[in-house]
Amino acid sequence: MSKFENHKKLYLNFKGDAENEDVSFPSRAELYFLSIYHLIESCAAKYRIHINKHQKVRITLENNPHIFEKETENIWRLFQDIENKIRPKFTYGFSWTDKDFNELKEKYYKLEEICIKVLTDES
Protein backbone atom coordinates (compact mmCIF):
# COMPACT_ATOMS: atom_id res chain seq x y z
CA MET A 1 0.00 0.00 0.00
CA SER A 2 1.39 3.40 -0.93
CA LYS A 3 1.94 6.17 1.59
CA PHE A 4 -1.00 7.98 -0.04
CA GLU A 5 -3.27 4.99 0.53
CA ASN A 6 -2.02 4.56 4.11
CA HIS A 7 -2.73 8.18 4.97
CA LYS A 8 -6.13 8.10 3.30
CA LYS A 9 -7.07 4.95 5.22
CA LEU A 10 -5.95 6.50 8.52
CA TYR A 11 -7.89 9.68 7.74
CA LEU A 12 -11.07 7.67 7.17
CA ASN A 13 -10.56 5.41 10.20
CA PHE A 14 -9.89 8.30 12.58
CA LYS A 15 -12.78 10.32 11.12
CA GLY A 16 -15.19 7.43 11.61
CA ASP A 17 -14.15 7.11 15.23
CA ALA A 18 -14.24 10.90 15.77
CA GLU A 19 -17.84 11.01 14.59
CA ASN A 20 -18.91 8.26 16.99
CA GLU A 21 -21.06 10.08 19.52
CA ASP A 22 -20.54 7.31 22.09
CA VAL A 23 -16.89 8.39 22.39
CA SER A 24 -15.94 11.18 24.82
CA PHE A 25 -15.37 14.70 23.51
CA PRO A 26 -11.66 14.69 24.51
CA SER A 27 -11.08 11.47 22.58
CA ARG A 28 -13.09 12.71 19.62
CA ALA A 29 -11.09 15.97 19.54
CA GLU A 30 -7.85 13.98 19.33
CA LEU A 31 -9.31 11.74 16.63
CA TYR A 32 -10.43 14.72 14.52
CA PHE A 33 -6.91 16.12 14.86
CA LEU A 34 -5.32 12.84 13.76
CA SER A 35 -7.82 12.44 10.94
CA ILE A 36 -7.18 15.88 9.42
CA TYR A 37 -3.43 15.49 9.79
CA HIS A 38 -3.55 12.31 7.72
CA LEU A 39 -5.79 13.94 5.14
CA ILE A 40 -3.27 16.77 4.75
CA GLU A 41 -0.54 14.10 4.49
CA SER A 42 -2.61 12.43 1.74
CA CYS A 43 -2.60 15.66 -0.24
CA ALA A 44 1.17 15.98 0.16
CA ALA A 45 1.67 12.32 -0.77
CA LYS A 46 -0.24 12.95 -4.01
CA TYR A 47 2.81 15.04 -4.96
CA ARG A 48 5.31 12.57 -3.43
CA ILE A 49 5.97 14.87 -0.49
CA HIS A 50 5.91 13.58 3.07
CA ILE A 51 5.33 15.78 6.11
CA ASN A 52 6.19 13.00 8.60
CA LYS A 53 5.24 14.95 11.77
CA HIS A 54 2.30 17.18 12.58
CA GLN A 55 4.75 19.83 13.83
CA LYS A 56 6.10 20.14 10.27
CA VAL A 57 2.83 20.88 8.49
CA ARG A 58 3.42 24.62 8.15
CA ILE A 59 7.04 24.50 6.97
CA THR A 60 6.37 21.64 4.56
CA LEU A 61 3.39 23.39 3.01
CA GLU A 62 5.20 26.72 2.79
CA ASN A 63 8.09 24.98 1.04
CA ASN A 64 5.68 23.23 -1.35
CA PRO A 65 2.97 25.78 -2.20
CA HIS A 66 1.91 23.82 -5.29
CA ILE A 67 0.07 21.33 -3.07
CA PHE A 68 -2.64 23.75 -1.91
CA GLU A 69 -1.78 26.78 -4.04
CA LYS A 70 -3.77 29.82 -2.83
CA GLU A 71 -5.13 27.84 0.13
CA THR A 72 -1.68 27.06 1.57
CA GLU A 73 -1.75 29.62 4.38
CA ASN A 74 -5.39 28.88 5.14
CA ILE A 75 -4.58 25.18 5.51
CA TRP A 76 -1.69 25.57 7.93
CA ARG A 77 -3.45 28.29 9.95
CA LEU A 78 -6.62 26.23 10.41
CA PHE A 79 -4.52 23.17 11.25
CA GLN A 80 -2.45 25.10 13.79
CA ASP A 81 -5.62 26.46 15.40
CA ILE A 82 -6.80 22.90 15.94
CA GLU A 83 -3.37 21.65 16.99
CA ASN A 84 -2.28 24.45 19.30
CA LYS A 85 -5.39 26.31 20.47
CA ILE A 86 -8.31 23.89 20.55
CA ARG A 87 -6.91 20.36 20.94
CA PRO A 88 -4.87 21.10 24.10
CA LYS A 89 -8.04 22.14 25.94
CA PHE A 90 -9.36 18.61 25.47
CA THR A 91 -6.10 16.71 25.75
CA TYR A 92 -4.53 18.34 28.80
CA GLY A 93 -7.41 19.43 30.96
CA PHE A 94 -11.05 20.26 31.36
CA SER A 95 -11.10 23.85 30.12
CA TRP A 96 -13.07 23.03 26.97
CA THR A 97 -16.69 23.84 26.25
CA ASP A 98 -19.24 22.68 23.68
CA LYS A 99 -18.36 25.85 21.75
CA ASP A 100 -14.73 24.68 21.53
CA PHE A 101 -15.82 21.30 20.18
CA ASN A 102 -18.05 22.95 17.60
CA GLU A 103 -15.19 25.26 16.56
CA LEU A 104 -12.90 22.26 16.16
CA LYS A 105 -15.44 20.52 13.91
CA GLU A 106 -16.04 23.69 11.87
CA LYS A 107 -12.31 24.07 11.20
CA TYR A 108 -11.98 20.35 10.54
CA TYR A 109 -14.70 20.44 7.87
CA LYS A 110 -13.18 23.53 6.21
CA LEU A 111 -9.84 21.74 6.01
CA GLU A 112 -11.48 18.57 4.77
CA GLU A 113 -13.29 20.43 1.99
CA ILE A 114 -10.07 22.01 0.71
CA CYS A 115 -8.19 18.72 0.92
CA ILE A 116 -10.88 16.77 -0.93
CA LYS A 117 -10.67 19.31 -3.77
CA VAL A 118 -6.91 18.75 -3.99
CA LEU A 119 -7.32 14.98 -3.98
CA THR A 120 -10.03 14.97 -6.65
CA ASP A 121 -8.25 17.44 -8.93
CA GLU A 122 -6.87 15.51 -11.90
CA SER A 123 -3.86 17.78 -12.45
Image (cartoon, helix red, strand yellow):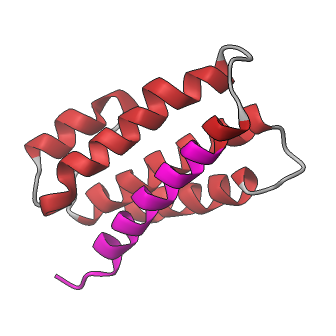
**Can residue 67 be seen?**
no
Residue that protrudes farthest toward the top in the picture:
93
**Can residue 8 be seen?**
yes
Is residue 25 left or right of 116 when viewed as pictured?
right
Q: Residue at x 54, y 30 (%)?
A: 86
Image coordinates of residue 46 in percent, x first then y, are 27, 66
User: Is residue 51 positioned above or below 22 on the image?
Assistant: above
Secondary structure mostly taken by the magenta-highlighted segment of the chain:
helix
Q: Residue at x 35, y 27 (%)?
A: 55
Closer to the camera in the image, 86 or 52:
86
Q: Residue at x 90, y 49 (%)?
A: 22
Image coordinates of residue 30 in percent, x first then y, are 63, 36
Image coordinates of residue 75 in percent, x first then y, are 30, 50
Q: Quadrant of the C terminus?
A: bottom left
Closer to the camera in the image, 15 or 104:
104
Q: Quadrant of residue 42?
A: bottom left
Q: Quadrant of residue 68?
A: bottom left
Q: Please tell me whether residue 43 belongs to the stretch shown in magenta.
A: no
What residue range appears in magenta? 102-123
